[in-house]
């Protein structure tokens, strides 16, 4: 089945220790997204890639970086995690036609704990 | 600017009751998509429906139905004969086609609890 896969499902890191979350997709979608979702809140878009074109949201902290080496994979790097970065991180994909973003398909998420 | 409002933070119903989740949106774009997603306790966001702004036909899929009214900028979601498995957080979302700046804007979600 075509899907969005996130690894690991649970990640524990220490305050200030860099961490990388990964996402892969078999949908061959040209857009990949990273969202941060804190408890009882809506997902918040951090950035997205349209093919290799990186689009950062204005309020995404510099502490968050992303890489997309190919169509299938996208990584979220948190350079120096703080306690406030503990959250669920959701990866999503969609196709895009012109300026139109189609429905997004989400992975199961990675729950990050910062000690 | 685009905005999605889900005024109901939490709803509790008894199994087999019908329940409607409200969604009101704001946009200056004439062409847009509206979505509903379900987030069960496992955490994954599950796509339920996409509606184009030019298509105001209501849609029914099993126990789910959606009522889109441009006149009131609403896109409400009704679950008929609710079941315990419907317990989840439901998000309404909006995507403007012409601005292209923000792919998807979510409402704050409505937590639905269906009690057996």
Image (tube, rainbow, N blue to C red):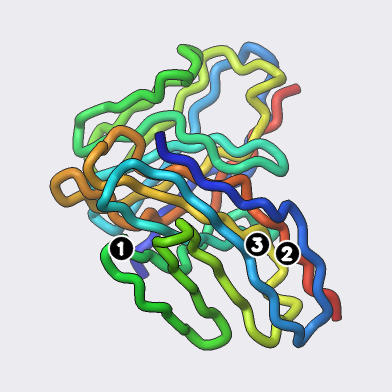
Identify whether B116 is placed above or below A90.
below
Q: Tell me what residue is drawn at x 34 percent, y 56 percent.
A: B33
Chain ID, mark 2: B
- Tell me residue B88's x, y (percent): 68, 63
Residue in the picture at 71% in, 19% down: A83
Residue to which mark 1 is pinned: B52
Location of residue A82 (image quadrant): top right
Among the two numbered marks 3 and 2 on one chain, the one whose residue lies closer to the N terminus: 3
- In the displayed structure, does residue B83 sit left or right of residue A55? right
From the viewer's perspective, is the residue at label 1 or at label 2 nearer? Answer: 1
Q: Name the mark nearer the viewer: 3 or 1.
A: 1
In this view of the protein, can residue A72 be seen by the observer? no
Q: Residue furthest left?
A: A98
Residue located at (41% from left, 54% from top): A4
The label shown at residue B70 is: none
Helix or strand or loop: what does disc 3 sit on?
loop
- Give the residue pinned by disc 3: B40
User: What's the chain of the residue with tag 3?
Assistant: B
Of the 4 image quadrants, the one containing the N terminus of chain A is bottom left
When the figure is inspected, residue A63 is found, relative to residue B54, above or below; the finding is: above
Q: CA distance from mark 3 to mark 2?
A: 10 Å
The tag on residue B112 is 2
């Amino acid at each position: 089945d075509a899907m969005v896969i996130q690894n690991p499902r649970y990640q524990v890191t220490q305050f200030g220790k860099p961490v990388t979350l990964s996402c892969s997709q078999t949908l061959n979608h040209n857009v990949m997204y990273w969202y941060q979702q804190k408890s009882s809140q809506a997902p918040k878009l951090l950035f997205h890639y349209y093919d290799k074109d990186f689009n950062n949201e204005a309020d995404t902290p510099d502490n968050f970086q992303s890489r997309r080496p190919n169509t299938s994979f996208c990584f979220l790097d948190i350079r120096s995690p703080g306690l406030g970065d503990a959250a669920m991180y959701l990866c999503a994909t969609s196709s895009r036609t012109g300026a139109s973003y189609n429905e997004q398909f989400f992975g199961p998420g990675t729950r990050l704990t910062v000690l | 600017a685009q905005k999605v409002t889900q005024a109901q933070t939490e709803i509790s119903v008894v199994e087999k009751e019908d329940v409607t989740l409200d969604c009101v949106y704001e946009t200056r774009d004439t062409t847009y998509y509206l979505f509903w997603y379900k987030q069960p306790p496992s955490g994954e966001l599950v796509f339920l429906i996409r509606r184009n702004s030019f298509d105001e036909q209501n849609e029914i899929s099993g126990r789910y139905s959606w009522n889109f009214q441009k006149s009131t900028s609403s896109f409400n979601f009704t679950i008929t004969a609710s079941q315990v498995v419907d317990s989840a957080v439901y998000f309404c979302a909006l995507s403007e086609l012409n601005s292209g700046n923000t792919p998807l804007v979510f409402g704050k979600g409505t937590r639905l609890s269906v009690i057996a």
